[in-house]
């Protein structure tokens, strides 16, 4: 199955929608961490499923082992939100939140789940508010722990042909903290999103 | 009198939204810039008595535009229009000489309120 690429207008509009959502999520993160969060321009790619792993590696960068949290979203748009953090990021997070060095595994997981939940909630709310769509999302769960980026997703387990990857990242000045948030959507959801974006552009 | 204004944003949609949010009946001549460098060119060409400035842009971002304008002796009314809504981002742009900060997505009420507050309309 082939998929029509996004038009320049669709990409521009989607980028701006993400930009607004990213700003809201970044503000939530800044409030939790009590630090200034640096934002970057969101990235958008449609790739064949076999390329998903490579694209994620490219987006996240060649980092040390990572931990990833996933949350599924559904209703008007269906997909997966994935928050990826490397070990430095996890440590920084614990440090900023006032935990001592001996954070046990369970407490670290809980912390990651909480932060991911805030980021994903804020970004999905931002997208739905702007596009006028409605979304629900699942509770966060750890999908990979301290493993290479390549191991987050195994494309062989996906029944899709194409995926839309939306990426935003958050970092802190003077610290190693970096967190990537990916929204991953399959063919059907790409078309729903395309329609929502078209309707939005038309309404302007 | 027609006021020359420049809308600076890398997103075409965002420039369109900003244009739409301008108060009805405000006599303006609108120029557009897609990055900070173009914004400064428009400013030097006398096309920006009022500038609506995005922050995150390629080539030259909004912070750099404000820094340059400040160095040159700011002679334009800059309203920052940004998705980065952290209080610290707002503090930083205000300290660089921006007169106001509007959160994206923009709306006419907010733009009108700011322009009225400073006697521009």
Image (cartoon, rainbow, N blue to C red):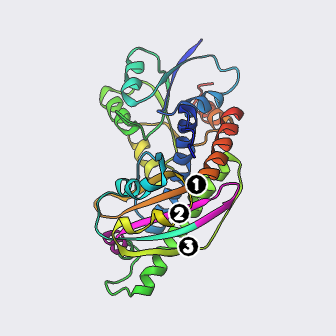
Between disc 3 and disc 2, whose residue precedes?
A: 3
**Residue linked to disc 3:** A140
**Circle 1 or circle 2, nearest the eye:** 2
Whole-angstrom CA distance, mark 3 to mark 1, is 20 Å
Judge the density around disc 2: few (<14), some (14-19), many (≥20) Cα neighbours within 10 Å.
few
Residue A60 on image: x %, y % = 36, 58
Q: Give the residues drawn in magenta, as a range.
A: A72-92
- The secondary structure type at the circle numbered 3 is loop
Q: Which of B112 and A11 is in front in this view?
A: A11
Please report, as a chain letter, where disc 1 is located: A
* Relative side of A86 to A29, left or right: left
Q: Nearer the viewer, residue A112 or B60?
A: A112
Q: Which residue is drawn at 57% across and 46% down?
A: A1
**Residue linked to disc 1:** A186
Which numbered dot is residue A158? 2
- The secondary structure type at the circle numbered 1 is strand
Judge the density around disc 1: few (<14), some (14-19), many (≥20) Cα neighbours within 10 Å.
many
**Circle 3 or circle 1, nearest the eye:** 1
Residue B67 on image: x %, y % = 33, 35
A99 in magenta = no
Judge the density around disc 3: few (<14), some (14-19), many (≥20) Cα neighbours within 10 Å.
many
Residue B78 on image: x %, y % = 47, 31
- The secondary structure type at the circle numbered 2 is loop
Whole-angstrom CA distance, mark 3 to mark 2, is 20 Å
Between disc 1 and disc 2, whose residue precedes?
A: 2
Dots 1 and 2 on the same chain: yes
**For the residues bearing labels 3 and 1, Cβ distance under 8 angstroms:** no
Please report, as a chain letter, where disc 2 is located: A
For the question of whether residue A111 can be seen, the reply is yes
Please report, as a chain letter, where disc 3 is located: A
């Amino acid at each position: 199955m082939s998929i029509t690429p996004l038009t320049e207008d669709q990409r521009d509009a989607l980028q701006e929608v993400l930009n607004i959502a990213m700003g809201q999520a970044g503000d939530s993160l800044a409030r939790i961490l009590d630090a200034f969060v640096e934002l970057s321009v969101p990235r958008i790619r449609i790739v064949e499923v076999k390329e998903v792993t490579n694209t994620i590696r490219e987006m996240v960068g060649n980092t040390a082992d990572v931990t990833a949290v996933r949350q599924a979203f559904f209703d008007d748009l269906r997909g997966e939100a994935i928050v990826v953090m490397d070990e430095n990021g996890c440590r920084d997070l614990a440090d900023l939140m006032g935990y001592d060095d001996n954070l046990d595994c369970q407490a670290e997981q809980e912390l990651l789940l909480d932060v991911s939940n805030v980021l994903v909630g804020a970004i999905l709310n931002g997208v739905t508010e702007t596009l006028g769509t409605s979304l629900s999302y699942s509770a966060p769960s750890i999908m990979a722990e301290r493993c290479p980026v390549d191991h987050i997703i195994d494309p062989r387990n996906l029944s899709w042909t194409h995926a839309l990857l939306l990426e935003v990242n958050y970092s802190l000045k003077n610290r190693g903290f970096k967190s990537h948030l990916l929204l991953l959507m399959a063919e059907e959801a790409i078309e729903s999103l395309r329609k929502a974006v078209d309707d939005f552009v038309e309404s302007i | 009198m027609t006021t020359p204004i420049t809308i600076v944003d890398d997103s075409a949609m965002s420039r369109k939204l900003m244009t739409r949010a301008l108060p009805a009946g405000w006599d303006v001549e609108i120029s557009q810039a897609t990055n900070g460098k173009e914004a400064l060119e428009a400013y030097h060409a006398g096309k920006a008595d009022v500038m609506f400035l995005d922050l995150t842009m390629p080539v030259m971002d909004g912070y750099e535009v404000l820094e340059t304008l400040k160095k040159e002796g700011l002679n334009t009314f800059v309203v920052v229009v940004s998705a980065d809504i952290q209080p610290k981002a707002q503090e930083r742009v205000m300290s660089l000489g921006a007169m106001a900060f509007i959160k994206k997505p923009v709306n006419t009420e907010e733009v009108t309120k700011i322009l009225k507050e400073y006697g521009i309309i």
